[in-house]
Amino acid sequence: MSNKPARPAPDQARDLDTFPEAEPPSRNQPPPSSSSLRGIIDALVQGSLVDLFQVYGVACAPLPRDGRNERYPELSAVISFTSASDGKCARASGRLGLSMSPEVLELMQGERAPQTRQGDWSRELVNQLMGRFKNRLLPYGAILQAGLPSSIARDALEAAGERAVGRRVYRARTIRGEVVATLDGSLNEAELSYVGPTAAASEGELILF
Amino acid sequence: MKHVLVVDDSQTIRHELSQALTAAGYAVVEAADGVAGLERVAETQFAMIILDVNMPRMGGLEMLEQLSRDPKSSKIPILMLTTEAQRSTIDRARRAGAKGWLVKPVKLELVVTTVTALTQ
């Protein structure tokens, strides 16, 4: 839940029937070529991370991916994903992780801090991060199915990264410390191609049927 | 007093929704997955169900479809509350009889307003 202003009230909610189907890219604006999609996964993960924190009122600035080998913050949760059969990236599978310190988690908890278990909230946050990432991949034809979030010890997450091929590590800074998102697996941006907007709803949005 | 069932595997989300809806005058029952949710539905007459999608044991869409097949529960308004935003998933919920779809994270006031509208 967030402290942002409410999105549409029920009487203002969008009717799914009126939601436009995905439109082909404009003739005046050619779709991104595969070469211009290089780095799109990095951008989508980082954008999802910043947006998620912003919703909870926490400023979060991505740091350059410089290959630093510092330890992750101590509270971590992960969520696995696989590709759906009807999307691109047919062989994609992997795991998205989110790590933060108790101090940063407390910032994200806001007023709910006294009633929140750290592990439960960490899992919910990585679940919401995955949701954002998934939804941002939809315009590129990639449909992911997420598993269930689980907590993981920092040592185990770091060790898994040493075994994983090509772990992507995204660090970001908040006022109370760093946040780290990790992406393991076989999600390959070479398989992505822009197909236009396809998500039927945005975060915080209400659709009444 | 109207009873609302909140089904979500996040204890934090359940607690937040429960507090907000209780303050709005509803009696709230919680369940952590679809199996527990169906058990609660068998015990209590609910005016509304708020249902997550991805949960252990039984997900929200499966629970929704089971409820819609049972004449005893098919009339209960169901609001899906989830991080999922894919059209095909939303369409599946609509076909199964859900009344609305909210994409997390959402403001609690919007949930309460929606519940109020759907239970009138």
Image (tube, coloured by chain):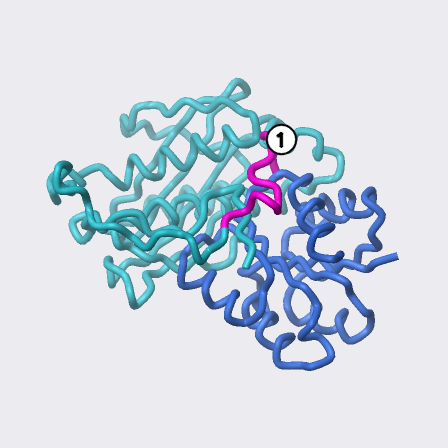
Q: Is residue A104 visible?
A: yes
- Direction right: furthest residue: B1
- Residue shown at 57% from the left, 43% from the top: A12
Task: Write the start and end of the magenta stretch as one range.
Answer: A1-14
Q: Residues within 10 Å of mark 1 (few under 14, many from 20)?
A: some
Chain drawn in cyan: A
- Relative side of A24 to A96, left or right: left
Instruction: Work out whether residue A189 or residue B98 is closer to the camera in this orientation and state it.
Output: B98
Chain drawn in blue: B
Q: Secondary structure at mark 1?
A: loop
- Amino acid type for the residue under numbered disc 1: Asn
Q: Which residue is mark 1?
A: A3
- Relative side of A194 to A172, left or right: left
Quadrant into which the N terminus of chain A falls = top right
Does residue A101 lie above or below B120 as drawn? above
- Relative side of A124 to A138, left or right: right
Q: Is residue A8 magenta?
A: yes
- Residue shown at 35% from the left, 60% from the top: A82
- Residue B42 appears at what percent x and percent y? 77, 76
- Residue A47 appears at what percent x and percent y? 37, 33
- Residue A13 appears at what percent x and percent y? 55, 46
